[in-house]
Image (cartoon, grey):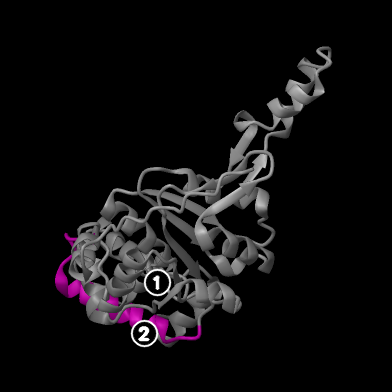
Amino acid sequence: MEKPAIPAQHASLFTDIDDVARRLAETGYLADTATTTAIFLADRLGKPLLVEGPAGVGKTELARAVAAATGAGLVRLQCYEGVDEARALYEWNHAKQILRIQSGSGAGNWDATKMDVFSEEFLLSRPLLTAIRRTDPTVLLVDETDKADIEIEGLLLEVLSDFAVTVPELGTITATRTPFTVLTSNATRELSEALKRRCLFLHIDFPDPDLERRILLSRVPELPEHLAAELVRIIGVLRGMQLKKLPSVAETIDWGRTLLALGLDTIDDATVAATLGVVLKHQSDQVRASGELRLN
């Protein structure tokens, strides 16, 4: 009879909400109260955190910041259309199994060979199983969950319920330490209510001008404050336009670094026109922005 799995142990990473804010800030991630509260509660309650919002607001970076702030290892499952259990959980190294079978074909002991080729040596751990098996503090990032097929949600529900995975040939593998889990979504489709119930929820939007200015200055400290404020103002105007892709916070930071690289301490229409490709990556967006900003 298979022994019952020992429940995963949960060890908190943060002492309180202020500790979350301070340690995230030390990594360069400036978070608002809603974000730090959600991180603290997900950590303290041992529940996954579903972070939803437009592309480019810092959802993925938040998971990276938690890992950096706590010294935890980051394990990332990048979702996409067609990702399956073999890419998300585990698969067997079939090529190696065939070689082993061929090498022992003359031995005549099939039962022993079968047990051999379905042993740990031939198991390829993918992100979900890797996170479960780690004994050190771990942040599991399931990135862009909404891009995966709905079948993957069933797998996530199974894994996130008790952080245990059954491999028929090896038995049940249970986490000895619950990973801090972040699922991100750009809301391109609705995730199932069952998955949402399993998680805490946090919506992140683009930061307000003051917070974005502080983020920019924390990442590009050499940038003059007046220039940072003007960049953030222009970014805000761009985000108010009907663009295919709104500028991300990371692109705001890149724009600041661009002006430093050019040795500029002011930004005029000519500079905006010349460097617009740093923040807008579609020609139609550049044409629209140039027209609405009257850069032509």
Q: Quadrant of residue 3?
A: top right
Residue pointed to by mark 1:
57
Q: Give the numbered dot on residue 237.
A: 2
* Residue 133 locus on image (x, y percent): 48, 44
N-term-proximal mark, 2 vs 1: 1
- Magenta stretch holds residue 199: no
Q: Amino acid at mark 1?
A: Val
Q: Which residues are magenta?
A: 219-242
3D distance between C-alphas at marks 2 and 1: 16 Å
Q: Residue furthest front?
A: 1
Q: Residue furthest top?
A: 106
- Magenta stretch holds residue 236: yes
The residue lying at 39 percent from left, 72 percent from top is: 57
Tell me: residue 90, above or below residue 220. above
Q: Quadrant of residue 249?
A: bottom left
Q: Amino acid at mark 2?
A: Val
Residue 256 visible here? yes
* Residue 78 locus on image (x, y percent): 54, 56
The residue lying at 73 percent from left, 21 percent from top is: 100
| Left or right, 99 with reference to 245 | right
* Residue 209 locus on image (x, y percent): 26, 81
| Left or right, 41 with reference to 49 | left
